[in-house]
Amino acid sequence: MEKTNLLVVENPKEPKPPLLDQMPEYASYVEGATLVDFDSVIAEAEVILGWGAKRDLMAQLLANGPKLRWIHSRSAGLDGLLFPELRESPVLLTNGRGVFSQSLGEFIIGAVLFFAKDMRRMMRSQKIGLWDQFAVQEIRGQTLGIVGYGDIGRAIAKRASAMEMKVLALRRRPELSAGDPYVSETFGFEQKKALMERCDYVVSALPLTPETKDFVNAADFAAMKKSAIFMNVGRGPVVDEPALIAALESGQIRGAALDVFAVEPLPAGHPFYSMENVLMSAHCADNTAEWLNDAMRFFYQNLDRFHRGEPLLNVVDKKAGY
């Protein structure tokens, strides 16, 4: 049986890929983090597994790999990988969409409850030994808007619906949510303001593309209820961060829960660190004990499909960017 030649392209600053000892017998692989590591094999490589790989190295491998047919990105987000030559090439690109959605959905529900029950106040009172009775909010019947209704958005909607929240979705193609049992109404991008006005909680799950840069901006925060909470588990740059800070500082919105930021790591002294009305996660809301293993298992599932000549899962529209 002819071997499938595979490159496992790593980033020295990130954890190494797990479960390589489970590589199928039909695949021959080489690990590396520089072009030199692949000098002897790039000419015959058909598949690249990008495990946090840098864009420049991926571009070099694409340019030097005449037999490449498929590149898989461990991550769901592709803004750091989609260089022009890859967009234009016939090489298939897949990503980790869906692998991390469940834990992000849980993070959002946790954030909703954090603000609804004012857990910041609970912890503050506990710390100083204060018996502090106060009224909390019930999330049943409140409205959660999801900006960017893809796989992560649907995982959020499923959990919010189970909590008896009303879910509104905003997406580029609203017709794709027809009949979705978790969504009450779906809006197109041009209806963004109408969605913002109605929500008690708004979460962005958008990928970063030229169309979505600063997609959530000052006008959106102005349209939101003063009691509303904004949350982001998509990409940091889809939000106008200075506008968000201004809205939080002025009380234009009540608070924010953020897993992603315009600059990461978030610089020391950034206002978010000291804001009482912000719940922060250091872009690790999906870093479960099994997340790397899950990412590799999904790749192996796709590798088996590739070997059998079957359609791959999670094929990316490289022009759209997701």
Image: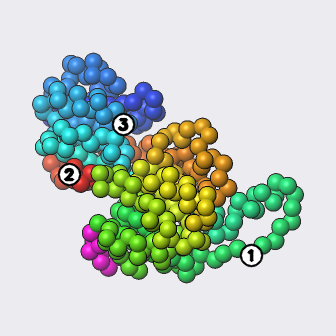
The picture places residue 190, in percent across and down from the top left corner, at 31, 70
Name the residue at 30% across, 77% down.
178
Q: Determine which residue is flagged by label 3.
A: 51
Q: Estimate the x, y position of residue 55 in percent, counting from the top left.
A: 30, 34
* Tag 3: amino acid: Trp
Q: Which mark is residue 242?
A: none
Badge 1: few (under 14), some or many (20 or more) residues near its Cα, within 10 Å? few
Q: Residue at the location (83% across, 67% down)?
A: 132
Contact flag, marks 3 and 1 (Cβ < 8 Å):
no
Name which residue type carries label 1: Ala
- Mark identifier at residue 135: 1
Mark nearest the camera among 3 and 1 is 1
Which of discs 3 and 2 lies nearer the camera? The answer is: 2
Tell me the residue that label 2 is attached to. Answer: 319
Left or right of 303? Residue 285 is right
Q: What range of the chain is rendered magenta?
A: 173-180
Work out how far the residue at label 3 is from the one at label 2, CA to CA, in angstroms. 22 Å
Q: Position of residue 130 (x, y in %)?
A: 86, 61
Q: Residue at x 46, y 46 (%)?
A: 262
Which tag, 3 or 2, sits closer to the chain's start?
3
Is 240 magenta? The answer is no
Tell me the quadrant of the picture where the N terminus can be found.
top left
Disc 2 element: loop
Magenta includes 178? Answer: yes
Q: What is the CA distance from the residue labelled 2 to the residue labelled 1?
A: 49 Å
- Figure quadrant of residue 238: bottom left
Q: Is residue 244 visible?
A: yes
